[in-house]
Image (spheres, grey):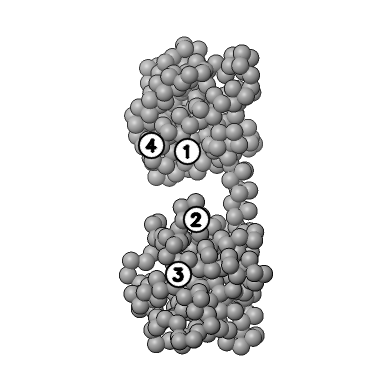
Amino acid sequence: MGEDARLRAVVTLAQAMAAAHTPRQSWRAAALGARDALGGSFAAVSVWERELGRLRVLVNAGTLAEGEEDFPEEETYPVHQFPEIAEFLHEQWAGGGEPNAWVETAAGPAEGDADAAGYCHQRVAALRRRGRGSCVVAPIVLRGRAWGELYVARPVGAQVFGRSDADFATVLASVAAAGIAQTERLEEVRKLAYTDPLTGLANRRAVDMGLDAAVERHRTSGTIVSLVVCDLNGLKRVNDTHGHAVGDRLLERFGSVLSLCGAMLPGTLAARLGGDEFCLLAVGPSADEVVRVSEELCVRAGGMELGEGVACGVASTGDPIGEVRSARRLFRLADAAQYRAKAALAAKPVVAGRDGAVVRLADSPPSAPHDRRRFRGRT
C-alpha cells in the first residue's frame, strides 16, 4: 500500500471513529478500519482488565473462526499468557521508547529475528488453530497507559505482515485510541445526564424518556407498562435527628433495595425522581408480577435500620385503569395511589384500579402545550 493509500485509510478510520456514538460502535469501527487499512481478513479489539489480570475481547470483525462472535460475552485471555502487553511493552516505555506494534506468524520467529523478544507462542498457537498465517498486534494507549490492543490477521497463504505494516498499525492504533477516548467521554457525559449522582440510579430525565417510549409501545403493540412510585417515609426526621449525611446514607440504602427488587423484573428501570421519591418502570411483566415485587419492596424497606418504610403506589396498563393514551396519565395514577398509601400509612402498595383506588384522572387535552414538568409529583 502506497503512502497516499495509507493516508486515505487513516482519514477513513478517523472519520469512522468520529461517527461512533456508543462504545460498541467505536470498537467495531476501530477493528473494521484497521482490518481494511492493513489488508487483513480479521481484526479484534481487546481491553486489558488490570484488576482481573486478563485481556477481554470487545469485538471481532471480518472472517470469524469457529467459536468467535462479533461481540463476545466471555472471550478472555489471562495476561500471563500474553506477557508482552503487561511486561514487554512497559519495559520498552520505561526506556523512553514508544509502544510499537509487532508481527507474529504461524511459523514462529525466524532464527536471529531482532523482534523475537516480543515473541509469544500462545499467539502462534492461536494463529495455527484458527487458520491464520500472520498477525500484527498494536497496543492501544489511553492517557499514557496501555488500555488494550488492536489485532489484525491475514489468512494462511496471504502475504505475511512486515515491519512497515507494524509501523502503520501503530499509527492506526493511535487514531483508534483517540476515537475510543472520545466515545468514553461521551458515554460518561451521557451517564451523568441520566443518572442520579447520590444513588447511582436513573434520574427523572431517564424516567421521562423511558416512560414516553414505553407508553407508545403499549399503544402500538399492547405491551403491559407498569409504574411503581415510592415515597421514602421518615427522611426529614432522620435529617433533623442525625444530620443530612445520615439521611443521604438512607437514600443510598433504599436505592440499593429498590435496585435489588427491580432486578426481579427483567428490564425494569429503577430511578430516583428527586428528594425522597423513587420509582420502578417495568415494561413487559404482568401487573401481578409488578405488584408482587412492590410488596417485597415494602417489606424490605420496612426492615431497614433507619427510616419508616415506604409509601408505594402502582399503576399498570394490565389492570382496569381505562385507556392510557399518555405517560402523564399513568404517572398521575401511580402518584395518586402512592398518596393514598401514604395517607393510610399502608404497609403494602396501593394499586390503581384495585380495591377502589382512584382511576378517574383525565388526560390533558391533545392540544395542551408540552410540559417538561408533566411527571412531577409534589414540589
Mark positioned earlier in the residue sequence (2 or 4): 2
Tag 4, which secondary structure? loop
Quick check: can you spot residue 70?
no
Distance of mark 2 from mark 4, alpha carbons? Answer: 30 Å
Q: Nearer the viewer, mark 2 or mark 1?
A: 2
Q: Are marks 2 and 4 in contact (CB under 8 Å)?
A: no
- Where is residue 147? Give x, y as percent: 56, 60
Looking at the figure, which quarter contains the N terminus?
A: bottom right
Residue of label 1: 269
Residue of label 2: 49
Q: Nearer the viewer, mark 3 or mark 1?
A: 3
Decide which of 160, 265 is in the foreground and name it.
160
How packed is label 2: few (under 14 Cα within 10 Å), some, or many (20 or more)?
A: some
Q: Nearer the viewer, mark 2 or mark 4?
A: 2
Checking the image for residue 283, the label placed there is none
Tag 2, which secondary structure? strand
Amino acid under disc 3: Ala
Q: Are marks 3 and 1 in contact (CB under 8 Å)?
A: no
How packed is label 3: few (under 14 Cα within 10 Å), some, or many (20 or more)?
A: many
Mark positioned earlier in the residue sequence (3 or 1): 3
Residue of label 3: 61
Amino acid under disc 4: Leu
Checking the image for residue 265, the label placed there is 4
How packed is label 4: few (under 14 Cα within 10 Å), some, or many (20 or more)?
A: some
Distance of mark 2 from mark 3, alpha carbons? Answer: 21 Å
